[in-house]
Image (cartoon, rainbow, N blue to C red):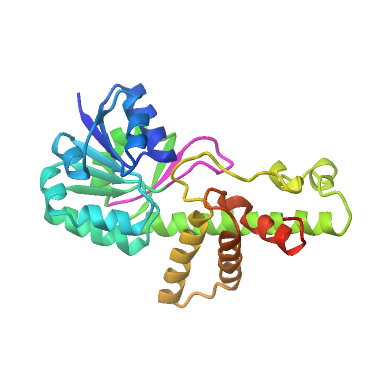
Amino acid sequence: METIGLVGIGAIGEQFAESLEAAGYETVAYDTDPERIDVAVERDAARAESPTAVAEISDAVVLAVPGSAEVEAIVETESFLAALSGGLLVDATTTRPETGVAAAERCGDAGVTYVAAPLTRGAPREGTLMMIGAAADEYERATPLLEDLCTAHRRIGPVGDGRRFKLALQLRYALRTAVDAEVTSFAREAGVDPTILNDFLGMDVSERYLEAGVDYATDNPGLGGLGIWHKDLGYALEVARENDIPMPLTSAGHELYKAGRRGAGPEENAPEAVQYYWERLCGDR
């Protein structure tokens, strides 16, 4: 039986722990927050004291950490790569594309197969969907584990391409959310009922936007509060600058999420950032 390591036990890492337990793997887990390791231990994972300790007893390691800085810190640790030599590293983190490219190079030099596997759980298609960046042979090697980690997966291209595609998806999520938040706030402040958008027109505006002053706090660990889309839109804008891609809507959206993040509490959730900001502007908060 293979042993699979988990580094990062936030909302995604917890889901992975559940999936791996159901698939019958032996698992070992690490998180910077000891209480989050407890969550994985409840799923029959063994406890580890560091990413290197995870790698020492794992055939494959799955990363689900906040962003580029955390991935870079792990793959730049020589002892981690040495411990995982000959094994597989599946990185489910949303990072800068170049973070994955550099990680793949370091892993390749150490004899570790690196697969970038950012995911979404918010698509119209149900389930957890992974958008893979990897060489074809490395994707094939990772496929049995990917089958147990997600509902469906697709190779987008080499390392870097999966993350670029995920950032494109994040743009749609974030900007569509911003539009819906602004539309419903506008309707409410203009004195008309925004629920008509759904009830009469058949639109799919989230019910969360149709109530003024609701509590937008999230109990999902690891999402980073309002920072998650602020981070990912920032990564996308970096790619746009490097490739001279005009991004006026994303630039405006990034500023709106930044404003929402400054005004909201640390645990409030990204999808409601713009509505929160509108409510503050209109005096409802």
Given residues 244 and 205, the one toward you in this image is 205
**Start and end of the magenta stretch?**
119-134
- Does residue 43 lie above or below 177 as drawn? above
* Residue at 39% in and 56% down: 163
Q: Can the viewer see residue 68 in this picture?
A: yes
- Does residue 218 lie above or below 27 as drawn? below
* Residue at 54% in and 35% down: 126
Q: Can you give x and y, in whole percent of width and height, for residue 20 in the image?
A: 33, 28
Q: Can you give x and y, in whole percent of width and height, for residue 138 in the image?
A: 24, 46
- Does residue 40 lie above or below 94 as drawn? above
Q: Can the viewer see residue 159 in this picture?
A: no
Lateral position of residue 279 relative to residue 187, left or right = left
Label total for image: 0
- Does residue 200 lie above or below 177 as drawn? above
* Residue at 76% in and 56% down: 284
Lateral position of residue 244 relative to residue 122, left or right = left
Residue closest to the far bottom: 244
* Residue at 89% in and 55% down: 191
Asked whether 155 falls inside the magenta stretch, the response is: no
Q: Quadrant of residue 108?
A: bottom left
Q: Quadrant of residue 208?
A: top right
